[in-house]
Image: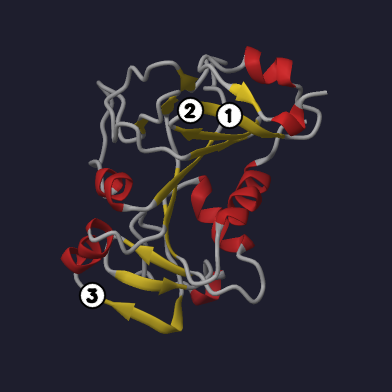
Amino acid sequence: MAWTREEMARRAAKELRDGFYVNLGIGIPTLVANYIPDGMTVTLQSENGMLGMGPFPYEDEVDPDLINAGKQTITELPSTSYFSSSDSFGMIRGGHIALSILGAMQVSEKGDLANWMIPGKMVKGMGGAMDLVAGVKKVVIIMDHNARDGSPKFLKHCDLPLTGVGVVDMVISDVGVFTIDETGVTLIELAPHITVEEAKKRTEASFKIAKELHK
């Protein structure tokens, strides 16, 4: 059985550490906020000028003026601070954000990332994605392993416009968890009932298999 989006987000939350400043991309990555372990202090940062985002609001708590970079309504905390977008990007470009968890359209086996546009389709803009992958210490991608037509999204080479070259450290998909480093791609964890053979069939990128997965 492949992981659901909530299960992917829960797995990504295992990459959090106490004291981390973290940026969550739109889509599945926003769900990671729901799985921050109890007792762990993680500060969420948003490119539009907010540090210390609270949980998503219930209907009676919605403030239309309080949004994250993905235009979703959010809540604030007693420790929340606000500042200009230029200060926010100064944090990112200055290397002060420990971890960014983003979505993706494509990832290559070299860690290249395409996640901001499909040629010919209208886009709102690249947002902060290019700064995030260049300035953040670790980049984790959460994505569906295959597109709606079944084609692989984890490829030998991306054919969509790139957000960054060699920037991805980890891919968490409905199939499992892959790390990317100077030695290449390694499959380190599989979703329940997903076999290594199925993972290979659904992936164009070449990858090694961690020792603990060998049977």
Residue 45 image position (x, y, % from top left): 37, 65
Residue at (64, 49) in percent of width and height: 11
- Residue kind at label 2, given as amino acid type: Thr
Residue at image mark 1 = 186
Q: Residue furthest left?
A: 86
Residue at (43, 28) in percent of width and height: 107
* Mark 3 neighbour density, 10 Å: few (under 14) some (14–19) many (20 or more): few
Camera-near label (2 vs 1) is 2
* Mark 1 neighbour density, 10 Å: few (under 14) some (14–19) many (20 or more): some
Comes first in the chain, label 1 or label 3:
3
Residue 14 image position (x, y, % from top left): 62, 55
Q: Nearer the viewer, residue 155 or 58?
A: 155
**Marking on residue 83:** 3
Q: Quadrant of the C terminus?
A: top right
Disc 2 to disc 3, how far (Cα)? 40 Å
Residue 214 image position (x, y, % from top left): 77, 24
The reply to whether the C-beta atoms of the residues labelled 2 and 1 are less than 8 Å apart is yes
Disc 2 to disc 1, how far (Cα)? 9 Å
- Residue kind at label 1, given as amino acid type: Thr
Residue at image mark 2 = 183
Q: Quadrant of residue 86?
A: bottom left
Comes first in the chain, label 2 or label 3:
3
Q: Quadrant of the N terminus?
A: top right
